[in-house]
Image (spheres, rainbow, N blue to C red):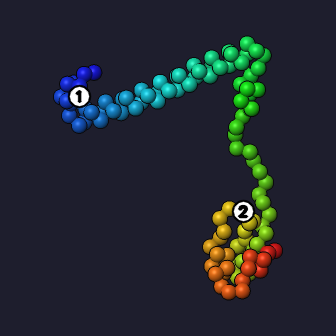
């Protein structure tokens, strides 16, 4: 498509063209990804390996058991914290007071 062709198009036609291009890119990427995976599987098979052998198996999310709570809000025993991740608001507010330490909330 020449530049002059684009100059003659209105906004509606340009947006439609953009939508078609985006859809085509997605489809092309899917096809090329499948082709590449097939080539890689064939190369691995030539030496007696699978893609899992080459790349270390599936990389799905590992299911972990929940971590036990280490700290509890003395004003509301339903509010607990395991000590991992961001410090809860209730604890942060209480730690701003003088003489209060994190050990005061230990279970």
Q: Residue at x 72, y 77 (%)?
A: 73
Residue furthest left as drawn: 8
Residue furthest bottom as drawn: 98
Question: x, y percentage for residue 63?
Answer: 75, 47
Residue 31 falls left or right of residue 105:
left
As rendered, which of 64 and 84 lies closer to the eye?
84
Quarter holding the C terminus?
Answer: bottom right
Q: Residue at x 74, y 32 (%)?
A: 56
Q: List the residue tagged with mark 2.
A: 84
Q: List the residue tagged with mark 1.
A: 6
**Rendered image: mark on residue 77:** none
Instruction: State the image quarter where residue 2 is shown.
Output: top left
Q: Secondary structure at mark 1?
A: helix
Q: Secondary structure at mark 2?
A: loop
Q: Is residue 75 positioned above or below 41 on the image?
A: below
- Residue 77 appears in the figure: no
Q: Residue at x 79, y 54 (%)?
A: 65
Question: x, y percentage for residue 78?
Answer: 72, 73
Question: x, y percentage for residue 42?
Answer: 68, 15
Label 2 CA crowd tier, 10 Å (few <14, some 14–19, many 20+)? few
Residue 15 falls left or right of residue 100:
left
As measured in the structure, the alpha-carbon distance from the residue carrying label 2 to the one carrying label 1 is: 55 Å
Question: x, y percentage for residue 75?
Answer: 70, 82
Residue furthest top as drawn: 46
Q: Is residue 71 positioned above or below 28 on the image?
A: below
Label 1 CA crowd tier, 10 Å (few <14, some 14–19, many 20+)? few
Q: Say if mark 2 contacts mark 1, CB within 8 Å.
A: no
As rendered, which of 51 and 31 lies closer to the eye?
51
Residue 22 falls left or right of residue 55:
left
């Amino acid at each position: 498509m020449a530049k002059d062709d684009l100059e003659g198009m209105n906004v509606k036609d340009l947006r439609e063209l953009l939508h078609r291009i985006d859809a085509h890119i997605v489809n092309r990427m899917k096809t090329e990804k499948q082709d590449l995976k097939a080539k890689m599987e064939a190369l691995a098979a030539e030496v007696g390996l699978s893609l899992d052998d080459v790349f270390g198996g599936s990389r799905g999310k590992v299911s972990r058991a929940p971590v036990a709570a280490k700290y509890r809000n003395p004003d509301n025993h339903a509010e607990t914290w395991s000590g991992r991740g961001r410090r809860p608001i209730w604890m942060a507010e209480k730690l701003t007071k003088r003489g209060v330490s994190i050990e005061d909330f230990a279970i």
